[in-house]
Amino acid sequence: MKLFLNDQEWIDTNSPLDISIPLQNNNSNLRAWYVDAPVIEPVRANGFVGSVAEGGGVNFRNIFFNPHGHGTHTECLGHITEEVHSINKTLTSFFCKALVISMQPTEQLNDDGEVDHIIEAKHFENIRPESDIEAIIIRTMPNGIEKKSMNYSGTNPPFLDIACIDFFDKYAINHLLIDTPSVDREVDAGVLAFHHAFWKVPENPNFERTITELIFVENSIEDGTYLLEIQAAPFENDATPSRPVLYKIHSK
């Protein structure tokens, strides 16, 4: 269906570009933060088995997973505040214009001997989002299908330098999406500098901003402006499994 955004722009709702990574019931499922693989299994109780293949009348399965460690998820400031604010209450608008950007992180030898891969302020120097852009989607390079089944634990994935926050504040960006497990360094002594700067915690908490991590942007999706829809499961939690979807914007 052709859906007009205004007098000049429209999207085709039959041509979505899904940039989420699905949850799988096996060891090839994406993992981070040292969590085990997710488990999806039939309920077994009082002679009942929730599996048609095993003779049950219906498939009725429990799912054990961690939203931060097992796949695409969207989180709010409740991720770093003493009170666990709910993403289900803070994410109340689901469509906005977004800019997809591919970035090659800078390699830097860290004090602990590990090589960091950092997205720095200089990566944003030549980016001038239009005034109606509310979300930035970062595809880190190189970009490969292995991101969909990666075990990131202990790999020191790419992250954002805190100096990048000036860009997000200057252009009033409320939604940041990235294909890594975190916007901060994997091991940072619990500082979470970018998380705190993005959400202005504790000085001036911003309840409108969200961070979506562990996305996957196919190479066939070009850098540029799209309509973004953040589909989010209604969990009363700081983070929830989500399905960000892009729609190419057409002009008359």
Image (cartoon, rainbow, N blue to C red):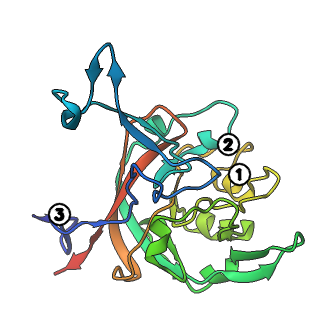
Q: In this picture, is 238 found above or below 147?
A: above
What residue do we see at 49% from left, 80% from top?
A: 143
In the displayed structure, 37 sits above or below 187; it is: above
Element type where label 3 sits in the image? loop
Judging by the rendered image, the residue that carries numbered circle 3 is 13
| Mark carried by residue 196 | 1
Badges 1 and 2: C-beta atoms under 8 Å apart? yes
Question: Distance between the Cα atoms at labels 3 and 2?
Answer: 35 Å
| Mark 1 vs 3: CB contact within 8 A | no
Label 1: few (<14), some (14–19) or many (≥20) C-alpha neighbours in 10 Å: some
Query: Can you say whether 234 is above or below 20 in the image?
Result: above
**Residue 229, position as x, y percentages in the image:** 33, 57
The amino acid sitting under disc 2 is Ile
Task: Give the answer, above or below, for where 196 lies relative to 104.
Answer: above
Q: Residue at x 73, y 65 (%)?
A: 162
Q: Give the distance between the C-alpha atoms of the residues marked 1 and 2, in whole angstroms.
A: 7 Å
Seen from this angle, which residue lies furthest top?
46
Screen quadrant of the C terminus = bottom left
Residue assigned mark 2: 80
Amino acid type at image mark 1? His
Query: What x and y, as percent, mark residue 122?
Result: 68, 83
C-alpha distance separating marks 1 and 3: 36 Å
> Could you tell me which residue is drawn at 21 percent across and 80 percent down?
251
